[in-house]
Amino acid sequence: MAEPRLTESLIQSLGAELTPVRRLPPPWLRTAGWLLAVAVFAAVLLWHYGADHMVRRWIAEPDIALAGAGAVITAACAAWVAFSLGVPGRSARWAWLPLPGLLLWVGASGLGCLRDWVLPGTQVAGVHQSADCLVFIIGFSVPLSALLVWLLRRACPLRPVLTALMIGLASAAASAALLEICHAFAVAATDLLTHAAAVAIVVLANAAMGGRLLQSALK
């Protein structure tokens, strides 16, 4: 009889030392919280630049509005996937979810490359303005990526590199959508290539650094 009592005593002592774990909010709620932070950036930019110029560009060039919508969809879907990958048992196939938004974003942006051929008088971005876009996308992606990594470290995702890729895609897409508020030029080939380079830099940087940070949370 001494052994069962010893086992029961050991279980009780171990249970007494356990601290309760607060359950994480569902992925959609955490995604909404991150998107709220993106909305704060958008509100500040709109306060500074106004919305009139952006709306006029969208009316004159609907493909730009479609590209912006695709970027927003990509950001929301990629962020949701990043949070979902921290849920045990969630399939990695959810990583394909941002693809439709990404295709809309890239496809609509690609239409702008034809604008300087079809409409020669259209004002397109030069090399200097394209470099400013590169700095803008990377600059805004840094705090947005950092916020996602911080929110995900408690989740301890089992696929840290894939999760980090989704973080980079979400942050870069959100930054590109924010750029629409103050982007004063039509999208030409040089501008599109610069945007693509900025997105690639953000995604790869997150895969390298964000993956390591998320892996450290598993240890």
Image (cartoon, rainbow, N blue to C red):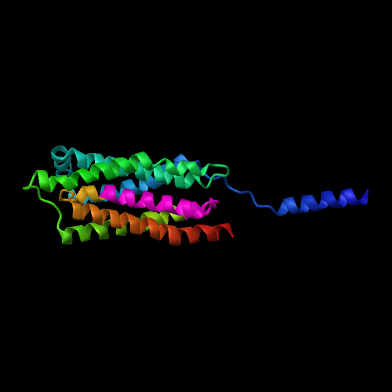
From this viewpoint, is residue 189 visible? yes
The main secondary structure of the magenta stretch is helix
In x, y percent, where is residue 16?
A: 73, 52
Left or right for 95, reference 108: right
Task: Give the magenta-colored segment's residue range.
Answer: 150-178
* Residue name at image x 54 percent, y 61 percent: 216
Is 174 magenta? The answer is yes
Locate residue 191: give its quadrant. Answer: bottom left
Determine whether 68 is above or below 219 in the image.
above
Locate residue 68: give its quadrant. Answer: top left
Is 208 magenta? The answer is no
In x, y percent, where is residue 3?
A: 90, 51
Farthest residue to the left: give it.
Answer: 121
Could you say which is closer to the camera, residue 124 or residue 189? Answer: 189
* Residue name at image x 16 percent, y 45 percent: 114
Determine whether 128 is above or below 91 in the image.
below
From this viewpoint, is residue 151 visible? no
* Residue name at image x 37 percent, y 54 percent: 144
* Residue name at image x 43 percent, y 57 percent: 207
Could you say which is closer to the camera, residue 49 or residue 85? Answer: 85
In x, y percent, where is residue 34?
A: 40, 47
- Where, quadrant-wise, is the C terminus in this rendering? bottom right
Please give the count of numbered marks on the rendered protein. 0
In x, y percent, where is residue 70?
A: 30, 41
